[in-house]
Amino acid sequence: MLEIFRRLSREYFLRLEAEVLSAGTTLLDVGCGGSSPIRFFSHKLHYAVGVDAFLPAIEQSRAHKIHHEYRQMDVLALETAFPPQSFDVVVALDVIEHFEKADGYQLIASMERIARRKVIIFTPNGFQPQGDFDDNPYQLHRSGWTVKDMRALGYSVSGMSGYKPLRGAHSEVKWKPKLFWHRVSVLTQPLVRHIPHLAYQLFCVKTFSDA
């Protein structure tokens, strides 16, 4: 039982690793931040590039050697730096919600042109208010994305982070004792995995025909 709980607690990271490595070994991490989840398996990748507009985040990530290369740039200008189909996988993990909806669609389209085999997007389910923090003005949330939005773009969608009403800002459980409610949230993961409308976050994957 303890092992099942541990796997549920790490489902996001395990699923991310499996989806990436099943599609190739070159990866573009859009809006990588200072502590990208790819840190758990980037040593298995042949080439990983981290892109972020916030220099301190890039410096933090570089210090931990998460990616092989970094670019500080506006992620909406990805196609000026990377040609079509130049990476096996392109990921945007907790990124698209930081843009207005129109810009988010533009970013997704750019990612799809740059990816050869797969695009992976991780985002809150619907709008989740969040302001600036860590002196990073890019942390503000400007849009919310739903299961319907992502499926309309051709993505398969799974629920993550447990039952949505249990969590609030920064994905933290809302109630005390926090340890108890965190465990409750984890135990709801098998339900929301298959009913993503109920989940706090969405794990979205689009696979191209040559994958």
Image (cartoon, rainbow, N blue to C red):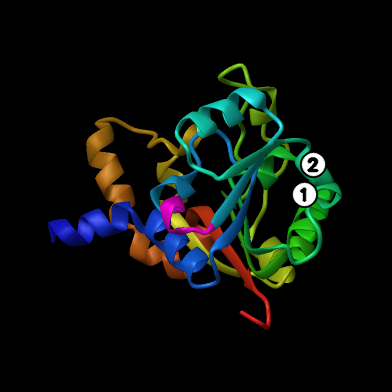
Query: Viewed as shown, does residue 150 lie left or right of 8?
Result: right
Q: Amino acid at mark 2?
A: Glu
Please provide percent x and percent y for residue 171: 46, 39
Residue 6 seen by the camera: yes
Residue 168 seen by the camera: no
Query: Viewed as shown, does residue 59 lie left or right of 65?
Result: right
Would residue 100 be counted in the magenta stretch?
A: no
Name the residue tied to disc 1. Answer: 104
Q: How many marks?
A: 2
Q: Are marks 2 and 1 in contact (CB under 8 Å)?
A: yes
Q: CA distance from mark 2 to mark 1?
A: 6 Å
Location of residue 30 with respect to 194 vertically, above or below: above
Disc 2 element: loop
Location of residue 160 with respect to 138 vertically, above or below: below
The 10 Å Cα crowd at callout 2, few under 14, some 14 to 19, many 20 or more, is few
Quarter-of-image position of residue 47: bottom right
Q: Residue furthest top?
A: 135
Location of residue 208 with respect to 182 vertically, above or below: below
Disc 1 element: helix
Q: Main secondary structure of the magenta part?
A: helix
Name the residue: 68% across, 83% down.
209
Q: Amino acid at mark 1?
A: Gly
**Toward the viewer: 97 or 112?**
112
Name the residue: 45% across, 33% down.
64
Location of residue 148 with respect to 62 vertically, above or below: below
Please provide percent x and percent y for residue 135: 61, 16
Please provide percent x and percent y for residue 143: 72, 42
Query: Where does the magenta region start and end?
Result: 42-46
**Toward the viewer: 185 or 56?**
56
Name the residue tied to disc 2. Answer: 100
**Toward the viewer: 25 or 8?**
25
